[in-house]
Image (cartoon, helix red, strand yellow):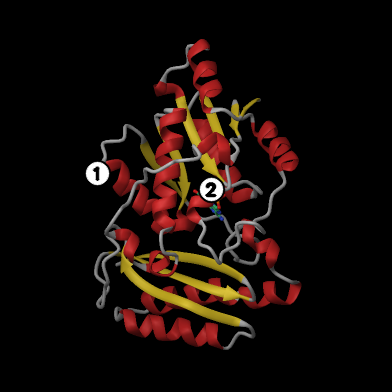
Amino acid sequence: MKILSKPSELREFIEQKGIKREEIGFVPTMGYLHEGHLSLVRKCRHENSFCVVSIFVNPLQFGPNEDLAAYPRDLDRDKALLEKEGVDLLFVPTEQDMYHPDFSTSVKETRLSRYMCGAFRLGHFDGVCTVVLKLFNIVQPKRAYFGEKDYQQLQVLRRMVRDLNVPVEVVGCPIVRDHDGLALSSRNVYLTKEQRQEALRIPKALEEAERLFKEGERRASVLEAKMREVLSAGKGLKVQYIEIRDADNLEEVEEIKGRVVVALAVYVGKARLIDNKILEG
Ligand code: AMP
């Protein structure tokens, strides 16, 4: 596995090897890898002959009071995992490699980004769109792989690629969960044993919503109330939002008809966890 940190070195390497855009699959990450990330890598490897992974904790997508400094990192472990998966190229730029000291351009998606996480993490999706477009321009992949775990991010990026004619196919990949149902996340490392147990109410709440839906309940407000009930019984859980929205355009839904995403963000102690489930009538 080739490891590079400078955008110019990466372009040189790919051009010297004569690797074409059509061959390149790409998985952007912030590292501290788990099976969720690795599921993206495996799909990417399977569908492309040249697989690029990036690890970059992007300061632009963290708010001033968020966990940028504390974000878990273990590059040696990540390298070993990616090597084992047969990744061809690992891109690990520093902040200086990515952002010029007087960097002054950004990408802003103005509709889908207003809701859900975007309403609480101001500027977050501008940071995501900007870094992903930069990474796309550096790596120039044919396909890029993102997890449905970050469902809103996936939809915002699909929109960016559509609106700006970015020649990259955005591929969504299913959420990978731990054996007990908790969605894998690098941030799960923040949880104590007790908090992790309480956090199981998150997938439980989503399962409850799905159960009611399967029984025929179509009122979003009823599903939301049920989820809130499951979560509020938990010790140290603080619900930031529970929302049921159209799965494509993320518009609010009262009566569930087509495909919707049931999404939530919950603080478990200081860890902010997100999860979601798609329901389809
Ligand atoms: P992150 O390192 O958190 O920025 O995540 C990098 C990519 O991995 C994003 O596209 C995430 O949506 C995806 N991802 C993270 N956790 C999971 C998971 N549990 N299942 C599937 N994909 C995931």
Give me the disc on residue 58: 2
Residue that carries the numbered disc 1 in the rendered image: 163
Q: Looking at the picture, does residue 202 appear above or below residue 34?
A: below
Mark earlier in primary sequence (2, 1): 2
Q: Looking at the picture, does residue 88 appear above or below residue 54?
A: above
Give the camera-side residue of 71 and 34: 71
Q: Is residue 209 left or right of residue 237?
A: left
Secondary structure category for the residue under label 1: helix
Mark 2, other Cα within 10 Å: few <14 / some 14–19 / many ≥20: some
Considering the image in quadrants, where does the C terminus appear? bottom left
Q: Is mark 2 within 8 Å of ligand 1?
A: no
Instruction: Using the numbered discs, state the Cα–Cα distance from disc 2 to disc 1 in whole angstroms.
Output: 23 Å
Secondary structure category for the residue under label 2: loop
- Measured as percent of width and height from the top left, residue 136 is found at 42, 34
Q: Residue at x 71, y 41 (%)?
A: 75
- Measured as percent of width and height from the top left, residue 269 is found at 64, 76
Name which quarter of the figure residue 71 lies in.
Answer: bottom right
Q: Residue at x 29, y 81 (%)?
A: 219
Give the camera-side residue of 153 and 114: 114
Q: Looking at the picture, does residue 267 appear above or below residue 68?
A: below
Q: Residue at x 45, y 54 (%)?
A: 148
- Measured as percent of width and height from the top left, residue 168 is found at 36, 34
Give the camera-side residue of 217 and 23: 23
Give me the disc on residue 145: none
Kind of residue at badge 2: Asn
Considering the image in quadrants, where does the N terminus appear? top right
Q: Is residue 9 left or right of residue 84?
A: left
Kind of residue at badge 1: Asp
